[in-house]
Image (cartoon, grey):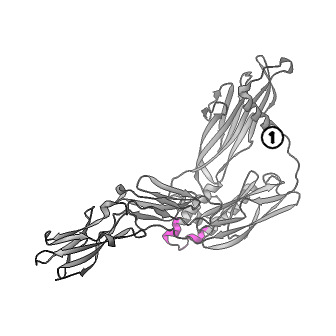
Amino acid sequence: MRRRGIEIYFVLYLAALMLLLSDSPKQERELASTALRNLLASTFNLIAEKPTLLCRALVERDSLAFLHFDSTNTIIPTGFVDSIHYRIIADDQATNQQRPLAIGTPTRVGNILFTIEQIGQALRFRWTPTSAQPSPRLFRIHIEATALPQLPPTLPPDQRQQLSLLLSQSDQRLQSQTSFIVGYLPQQPAVEQAPPQPLDSTIIARLEELVAQRQPQPQLGSFALVPEHTTIGTLPYVQWENRIAVYGASPLRDIAAPPQVSGLPSAFVTIEGNTIVVRSISTQASSANVNVRLTRRDGVEASTTFSVITYPLQPPILPTVMHPGIEYRFLPNLSNLSGIDTRALLRDEQNVIRASSSGEPMTFTPALSDTGRLFYFERYAGKERIGQVITIPCEMYPAPEILSVRRDGERSFVVVCRGYGLATDGRSRLRLDLDPSNGARVQELYGDYTYDEDLHARVQHFRLTLIGGASLKIAAVNGYQRRSPWRDLPQ
């Protein structure tokens, strides 16, 4: 029943996606392709049937008598996937050593024997103590899985064909993981009065805590739904999710019907443990109030409401070009988003230079050696890039300029020049070149010097006194041998 409910939500969601594909430009088809893969990825989860497997045993000499032994666990994959590959690791919590566990081949770790078999796409996990070891053992079993996405079988053939083309554009496998605890807690007979084991006290305390957690839970009580986010901020074509905690019932056992979601054109709903997960994608700037309703098997209902605000994608605030030695500020403009992991980065051809999360601004000061290089600014929501990659060149400062030439006497002129660079960089200061080189005497008027911090520009004044009567050309030159165009002095 639950699987059928998931497929209904899934098909409704894909029907909305098909509307985006019809007569859409290439960019929107690419966004739809990304949305489809994200949607399929969101259905792929590994669910461990039991969070903890415990063995309490009475140890007397070489004998082992089980007081409580939970030896088997089942790991079930959910979603529309195929060709699952598993990787299993046993992490010894006492030694921090990790041992890979093979499927189909028993693996012994100390006095513990692990056996794993794959049944269809699920895993059957078994373990057993093989000897009467007096020390406790505690393992965390990590299970990682990769799989190929597949479309639900209820899709009409024409839609399946079109969506299959979108999936075929990438061979990237979907990923999911889960973990659970395996604990071995030996006890000595009361008459033995075994000495304490201080080195294992932390492990024993953790195991006793796990035993306490496995006591019977109270019966159904207050029934409530509590969303993780009361307001979701998102962007067009970016998948968002909200996790809604269920109190007073188990969604896997105690619910009379699948969750009812209203207020959205389409939504994909899954149940993960005691949490309802609502995912969707908006195609344009808008706002919506989403209501989630759940009915318990005894007829009691619970509901909750949250808001989804889809903001238009704002352009980032960036420099269009950078010059060495200047600190630049990059503002991603992603600060209004919630329920979505966002980040921005500045990179070159090989490495990430700067990165920020949650829309935080970042700064970068290129070095002189960066002159001539290209840098790239990108923004991400989850794993998907949003917007375009923005190229920002790092260039040398503009060439010097001669702003004005005015006569200051019968044979003298005042020349005003502007050069670019840091105030502390001596090589960005200007001098005048003459053609012919001996055609005038040059004197800088230091009292008229000014520097503009915003433009990183200096203005220098020079007085030229002509020698002889020949015509004269002048140019402003800095220490990097960048010069202005030649200019004739007025006769």
Rendered location of residue 229, percent (x, y): 71, 61
Main secondary structure type of the part rendered in magenta: helix
Decide which of 59, 467 is in the foreground and name it. Answer: 467
Question: Callout 1 environment at 10 Å: few (<14), some (14 to 19), or many (20+)?
Answer: few
What quarter of the picture does the N terminus occupy? Answer: bottom right
Q: Is residue 24 magenta?
A: yes
Identify residue for label 1: 213
Rendered location of residue 44, percent (x, y): 64, 52
In the structure shown, which secondary structural element does the residue marked by tag 1 occupy? helix
Q: Is residue 328 left or right of residue 483?
A: right
Decide which of 484, 297 is in the foreground and name it. Answer: 484
Q: Is residue 353 left or right of residue 146?
A: left
Vertical position of residue 408 compared to residue 177: above or below? below
Decide which of 446, 487 is in the foreground and name it. Answer: 446
Q: Please, what is the three-letter code of the amino acid marked with disc 1?
A: Gln
Rendered location of residue 433, percent (x, y): 20, 68
Q: Is residue 240 magenta?
A: no
Look at the image and give the residue range highlighted in magenta: 17-30
What quarter of the picture does the C terminus occupy? Answer: bottom left
* Quarter of the rendering containing residue 198: top right
Vertical position of residue 356 compared to residue 70: above or below? below
